[in-house]
Image (tube, rainbow, N blue to C red):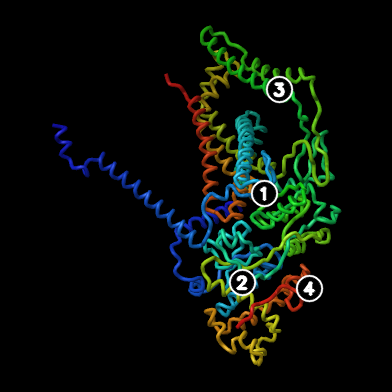
């Protein structure tokens, strides 16, 4: 595992050494290659995980598929690479991948010193704590002296340190890089609590041996806006990824879904016409086919469909829309005008 | 005439001068290549607006490290976090090497035992451990720890003052007392005296032929002096016993499952190789040496110490050094089971600051430093034990 990671960093370093000035933009490279290389988590049910047939499923996976649909008109033209938290940023920096859709929190440092750009948020999350019920803990403030399992190289790791420091509590982190190994250790009792984004905690609990034995504590100790990431310095590619996510949100607001998208093509609503490319201009501006948004919705669905399919109340995760509902219903999902 | 002929040879036909030209050329090429690579890196980093430089070392790390030999909190700097990691690597490597050498020596000798069972057991251990990748062994020992031991509230208490649970092994240590400093001083005095006693005894034996029971007297001093200091302070026996407070044990000394699993994995794996090294070393001493030593009336311990070991060591030491280096380097696998060694802390640093190049350079520098130090020490020792030809 470690060799893997180290070699990845080494490759990143070597690539930084040998990579000459990039002449072609990411869009041209992607088109010449014929598929998009997307970095994903690989271990979070509902966000990105291969199913029992080896097909990638999840909210982050569908986001990457939406980008492929916009670029190629074919949502399947994505190659997924599973990355650990530590590997993900070097992988993007060194051009191993074109876009990172891996529940990554947008922060100032990552946008500046790491040389990355966060596009539109595809999931608003917050950090919480998962504990066994038999521990009898009702609040995160009671976790003084606890051993806490946490992934390295994450904002989670820093938030946890801040939280315990601010509340004057002692704690001991157990830091394991592979999500699977970390969860195994937690569910076997190595730690008193597991801390991560609430959505991830729900995901890990849903695939644990005895989900009913664990509770997520009420405190949410941080803001975790999770967004697809691209490299600095390629505005065209940044725009494409950002507007692909906006298209998912906008479609839900306009009432366009994968079911009715063909019928909506006959709509007289100018907003819908611009969106679906029946009145042209938007696709060309992005450097894409005019049917870019139509392809996204036809093949992947709108944001609401993606949410309900992967993490919604009818899935094992059972997450409410909450902050991730449309702004018209009190959530934060708010697409900029497509015009 | 020879001189005149040499002067007439043009420099490109003079192998010596030609050699110098080639060497200068090679150095220039390497220098140019390095310059090209480094400037290219800087340009590329600049283009991607990734930060460079060592400024991050003095910034606040804001992450916590699980275990540390020195005081550390998330309010300390990255430099201190990295120091914590380096000390953790040093701790596991040092303890690991000591135990590995002892274990390897015992198993290596056992492998040569005339007792069928002992030698077969040693062989079985060597074959099994050598053939299983060390990473798997680490996962195994780690899983054994957290899967088999109970939670802290149901901790096993096999003997008074020792607690076994899935959070590690907690055991009682003597409570802090002023006597400890004096006991340490007494130990140092004992060691120094033992050193001079050995030199004196050797000189006397060279001069007069009389031997002196150096080992027994030295052992008496090294153990006896601290014991006397302890008695002089009224023999304090207060113990700092671990207590279950809240979720975990506090007080006493706790070895984490991560440390324990890493140590177990490294020691058992490397120990098998060391055992083979020791066996080879002993077998390299011809049987006649032993017979000759016995025939002049040396006791078995003298045969081993004066005849066999001095000759075996010169065969053992070089490969043993490389096994020690292997153990140190393999300790970086700690990252897989969550022991905060240098690589683990450096990885987190790389990820939080985004400065991979500096981070990887630091990792390389630290391991190079550890390895070169180990080599230097072992080379010095090797010089001491090699056969002095007269």
Mark 1 and mark 3 lie on one chain; the one further toward the N terminus is 3
On what subunit does the disc labeled 2 rest? A
Tell me where residue A146 appears, x and y as whole percent.
78, 49
> Tag 2's secondary structure?
helix
Classify residue B250 as left or right of residue B99: right
Q: Find disc 2 in the rendering and name its residue.
A: A64
Q: Are marks 2 and 4 on the same chain?
A: yes
In contact (CB < 8 Å): disc 1 and disc 4: no
Judged from this view, the residue extending furthest toward the top is B208
> Tag 1's secondary structure?
helix
Q: Residue at x 51, y 35 (%)?
A: B375
Q: Find disc 3 in the rendering and name its residue.
A: B183
On what subunit does the disc labeled 3 rest? B
Q: Nearer the viewer, mark 1 or mark 3?
A: 3
Q: Find disc 1 in the rendering and name its residue.
A: B337
In contact (CB < 8 Å): disc 3 and disc 4: no
Give the distance between the C-alpha atoms of the residues marked 1 and 2, in whole angstroms. Answer: 31 Å
Tell me where residue A159 appears, x and y as whole percent.
70, 56
Tell me where residue A243 appears, x and y as whole percent.
60, 76
On what subunit does the disc labeled 4 rest? A
Q: Nearer the viewer, mark 3 or mark 4?
A: 3
Q: Residue at x 60, y 83 (%)?
A: A339
How many C-alpha atoms fall within 10 Å of the one at disc 4: few (<14), some, or many (≥20)?
few
């Amino acid at each position: 595992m470690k060799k893997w990671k180290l070699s990845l960093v080494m490759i990143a370093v070597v690539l930084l050494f040998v990579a000459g000035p990039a002449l072609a933009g990411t869009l041209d490279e992607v088109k010449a290659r014929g598929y998009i290389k997307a970095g994903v988590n690989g271990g979070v049910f509902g966000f990105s995980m291969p199913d029992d047939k080896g097909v990638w499923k999840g909210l982050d996976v569908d986001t990457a598929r939406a980008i492929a649909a916009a670029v190629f008109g074919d949502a399947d033209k994505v190659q997924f690479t599973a990355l650990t938290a530590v590997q993900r940023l070097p992988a993007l920096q060194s051009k191993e991948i074109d876009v990172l859709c891996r529940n990554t929190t947008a922060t100032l440092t990552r946008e500046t010193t790491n040389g990355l750009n966060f596009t539109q948020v595809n999931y608003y999350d917050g950090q919480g704590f998962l504990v066994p019920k038999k521990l009898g803990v009702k609040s995160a403030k009671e976790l003084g002296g606890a051993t806490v399992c946490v992934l390295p190289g994450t904002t989670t790791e820093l938030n946890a340190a801040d939280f315990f420091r601010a509340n004057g509590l002692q704690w001991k982190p157990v830091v394991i890089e592979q999500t699977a190994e970390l969860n195994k250790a937690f569910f076997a009792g190595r730690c008193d609590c597991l801390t991560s984004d609430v959505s991830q905690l729900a995901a890990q609990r849903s695939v644990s041996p005895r989900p009913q034995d664990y509770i997520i504590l009420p405190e949410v100790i941080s803001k975790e806006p999770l967004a697809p990431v691209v490299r600095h310095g390629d505005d065209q590619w940044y725009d494409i990824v950002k507007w692909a996510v906006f298209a998912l949100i906008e479609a839900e607001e306009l009432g366009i879904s994968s079911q009715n998208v063909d019928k909506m093509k006959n709509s007289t609503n100018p907003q819908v016409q611009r969106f679906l490319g029946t009145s042209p201009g938007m696709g060309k501006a992005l450097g894409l086919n005019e049917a870019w948004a139509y392809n996204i919705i036809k093949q992947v669905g709108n944001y609401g469909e993606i949410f309900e399919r992967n993490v919604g109340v009818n899935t094992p995760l059972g997450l409410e829309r909450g902050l991730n509902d449309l702004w018209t219903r009190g959530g934060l999902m708010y697409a900029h005008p497509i015009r | 005439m020879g001189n005149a002929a040499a002067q007439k040879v043009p420099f490109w036909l003079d192998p010596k001068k030609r050699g110098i030209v080639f060497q200068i050329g090679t150095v220039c090429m390497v220098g140019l290549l390095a310059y090209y690579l480094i400037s290219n890196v800087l340009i590329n980093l600049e283009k991607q607006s990734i930060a460079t430089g060592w400024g991050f070392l003095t910034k606040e790390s804001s992450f916590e490290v699980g275990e540390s030999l020195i005081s550390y909190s998330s309010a300390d700097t990255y430099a201190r976090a990295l120091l914590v990691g380096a000390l953790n690597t040093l701790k596991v490597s040092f303890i690991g090497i000591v135990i590995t050498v002892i274990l390897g020596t015992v198993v290596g000798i056992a492998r040569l035992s005339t007792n069928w069972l002992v030698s077969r057991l040693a062989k079985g251990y060597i074959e099994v451990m050598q053939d299983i990748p060390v990473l798997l062994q680490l996962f195994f020992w780690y899983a054994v720890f957290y899967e088999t031991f109970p939670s802290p509230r149901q901790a096993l208490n096999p003997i008074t003052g020792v607690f076994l649970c899935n959070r590690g092994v907690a055991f009682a240590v003597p409570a802090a007392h002023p006597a400890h400093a004096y006991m340490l001083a007494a130990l140092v005095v004992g060691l120094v005296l033992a050193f001079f006693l050995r030199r004196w005894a050797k000189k006397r034996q060279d001069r007069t032929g009389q031997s002196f029971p150096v080992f027994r007297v030295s052992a008496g001093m090294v153990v006896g002096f601290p014991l006397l200091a302890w008695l002089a302070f009224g023999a304090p026996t207060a113990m700092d016993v671990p207590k279950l407070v809240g979720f975990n044990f506090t007080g006493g000394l706790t070895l984490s499952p991560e440390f324990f699993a890493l140590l177990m994995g490294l020691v058992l794996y490397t120990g098998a190789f060391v055992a083979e090294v020791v066996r080879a070393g002993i077998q390299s001493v011809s049987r006649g040496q032993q017979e000759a030593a016995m025939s002049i009336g040396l006791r078995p311990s003298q045969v081993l110490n004066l005849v066999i070991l001095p000759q075996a060591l010169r065969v053992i030491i070089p490969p043993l050094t490389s096994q020690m280096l292997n153990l140190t380097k393999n300790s970086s696998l700690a990252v897989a089971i969550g022991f905060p060694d240098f690589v683990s802390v450096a990885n987190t640093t790389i990820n939080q600051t985004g400065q991979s190049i500096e981070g990887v350079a630091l990792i390389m520098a630290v391991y190079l430093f550890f390895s070169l130090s180990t080599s230097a020490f072992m080379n010095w020792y090797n010089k001491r034990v090699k056969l002095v030809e007269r």
